[in-house]
Amino acid sequence: MPYSLAIFDLDGTLADSFPWFLRTINDVADRFGFRRVADEDIEGLRHASSREILSRLEVPLWKLPAIARHARRLKAEAAAEISLFVGVETMLRTLAENGVQLALVTSDSEANAREKLGEAAALFSQFDCSASLFGKAAKFRRVVRRAGVEPNRVIAIGDEVRDIEAARTAGIACGAVCWGYAAPAALRALGPDHIFAQMEEIADVLCENVGWISEA
């Protein structure tokens, strides 16, 4: 069955923010008193779940809201450093032109998200932003209700283990991209409905009879 609603994550899925994250994380760690991330820690963390990451870095759960607010401020200041991945605008436009509604659910603010997306922001019918670390499932459900779409025609696409877990909790399909924060092997191990190795594959899977990929 073709999908009629695609709910996208932003960071690591549409926006190439991982390099910024690596430059910033230790300043945030120092400010909020959790473990710094050494170069040799990065690959292991990319294979871990969100809860495992919090445990390894010794991040107190009660500090998460303050850390998230601080991170959103830093992202706003660094907006010029964070660009969309190549092919994002073409992919989103192809979906919209083929009748797929687009929604964005992200931990970032709506203002930051719109600035990162630029003109492509106009393609989205819904923004549900400032999600907590484990709060995406509730936002997915809300977006689906607002769209008036049956859950079996909805897919959430992200780059982290928690994106897959949230989609399953919300009762919708999940797609995982291989170019974001989590290691592809960690995502594949959870058996998402779709794995996307290239940006162009998203439109190929979500749309019926999309010819632009083979014609490119």
Image (cartoon, rainbow, N blue to C red):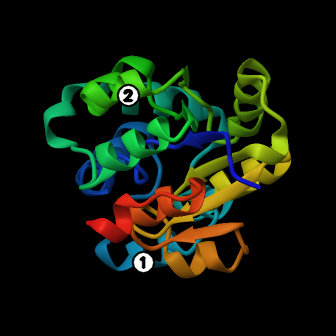
Look at label 2 and name its amino acid: Ala
- Please report the residue visible at 70 percent of the width from the left and 35 percent of the height from the top: 135
118 in relation to 16, above or below: above
Is 169 in front, or is 205? 205
Q: Is residue 37 visible?
A: no
Q: Within 10 angstroms of label 1, few (less than 14), some, or many (20 or more) residues?
A: few
Q: Within 10 angstroms of label 2, few (less than 14), some, or many (20 or more) residues?
A: many
Nearest to the eye among marks 1 and 2: give it: 2
Q: Which residue is mark 1?
A: 43
- Please report the residue visible at 39 percent of the width from the left and 69 percent of the height from the top: 198
Name the spot of residue 71 as percent of width and height, x first: 38, 33
Look at label 1 and name its amino acid: Glu
Mark 2: secondary structure: helix
Location of residue 54 by image quarter: bottom right
Q: Quadrant of the C terminus?
A: bottom left
Q: Is residue 85 left or right of residue 55?
A: left
Q: Is residue 6 left or right of residue 87?
A: right
Q: Which residue is mark 2?
A: 113
Q: Is residue 32 left or right of residue 22?
A: right
Q: Is residue 171 left or right of residue 202?
A: right
Task: State the CA–CA distance, disc 1 to disc 2.
Answer: 27 Å
22 in relation to 27, above or below: below
- Please report the residue visible at 75 percent of the width from the left and 29 percent of the height from the top: 144
